[in-house]
Amino acid sequence: MRVYKDAIFTAAVAMLVLAGASGSSFAGLAPELASLKGVESMTVHADCPESAKEIGLDEEDIRRNIQRQLEDAGIKVRPPQMWRAVPGRCRLRVAVKVYKPARQETFVYNLKVDFLQTVTLERKPQTQIDVVTWELMWFAHGPKSRLGQTIGQNLKVLTASFIKDYLRANPTYKDSAESQNSDSALTNTKGRAKSNPGSSAGKYLLTGSNGSDVFHKSHCHSVGNISTENIVMYKTRQEAVKAGKRPCKWCNP
């Protein structure tokens, strides 16, 4: 269920360089990992709309859980109100969206974890802007009774993915043995999340939009661009084709 945006990151980071970073600091790392190199601390922020709060999710609880997970991995986290004082204004942000499609019992949810920092334009170094340099999304569904627990588990998976990439970019934060333990923990967490009955590996496997004639696998990066109001879900490829949809060329459902 990981939604990668490598192509987007490659194009964006190719035009941007971190303030004060040299070209050699990117050697051997993909652009989104290179953007994490040298980050010494960060703040954590969570955003939940009213629809998410109605199922029992709390922004501060989510933020604290993410912060604890980062700190357990040895990553320094500053209080959220100090984000302007953090070098590079580095912020890890968590967004939760929940939506109940009409005439369906299941709830659809979209999770996004991204890393925002201040960068300078290569062509105009005096210009600084905030840019998302790392991002993962998770799109799935589940019954309301288990939604809070499932969302919490999947946020741990996304955070573990960020930690893994951060430690790859900053290996001095943890020795190799601890990094291997982080990889193992990520694998185990993924296994638990995938086996959870609230994940999208259950009843509905394909996703489309009322405003498009294309359908996708639920983990396709294009799914994250569909507004919750336009989400349409299908059990099989045949059902989607019968509804007049064609398969996405990127994920080939």
Image (cartoon, rainbow, N blue to C red):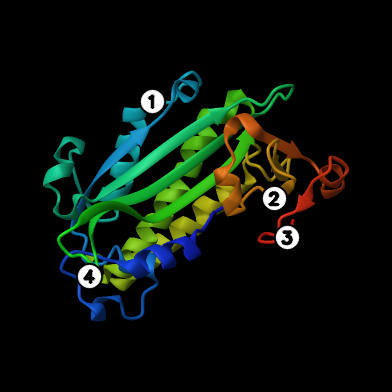
Circle 2 residue: 216
Please give the label number shown on residue 172: 4
Q: Are marks 4 and 3 in contact (CB under 8 Å)?
A: no
Q: Nearer the viewer, mark 4 or mark 1?
A: 1
Between 8 and 211, which is closer to the camera in this rendering?
A: 211
Q: Which residue is mark 1?
A: 58
Q: Position of residue 1 (x, y in %)?
A: 58, 51
Q: Residue at x 36, y 75 (%)?
A: 29
Distance in Å between CA atoms under marks 3 and 2: 7 Å
Q: Earlier in the sequence, mark 3 or mark 2?
A: 2
Q: Residues within 10 Å of mark 2 (few under 14, many from 20)?
A: many
Q: Is residue 85 above or below residue 60?
A: below
The CA distance from mark 4 to mark 1 is 34 Å
- Crowding near the residue tagged with mark 1, few <14, some 14–19, many ≥20 C-alpha atoms within 10 Å: some
Tag shown at residue 252: 3
Q: Are marks 1 and 3 in contact (CB under 8 Å)?
A: no
| Pointer 1 or 3: first along the chain | 1
Q: Secondary structure at mark 4?
A: helix
Asked whether residue 37 is in view, the answer is yes
Q: Indicate which disc, 1 or 2, sits on the residue closer to the N terminus.
A: 1
Q: Residue at x 24, y 68 (%)?
A: 122
Amino acid identity at mark 4: Thr
Whether pointer 1 and pointer 2 mark residues with C-beta atoms closer than 8 Å, the reply is no
Label 3: which secondary element: loop
Is residue 105 left or right of 165 when viewed as pictured?
right
The residue nearer to you, when weighing 96 against 67, is 96
> Residue 119: x, y in percent?
23, 59
Q: Nearer the viewer, residue 64 or 176?
A: 64
Mark sitting earlier along the chain (4/3)? 4
Q: Give x and y (percent) for residue 126.
A: 14, 61
Nearer the observer, disc 1 or disc 2?
Answer: 2
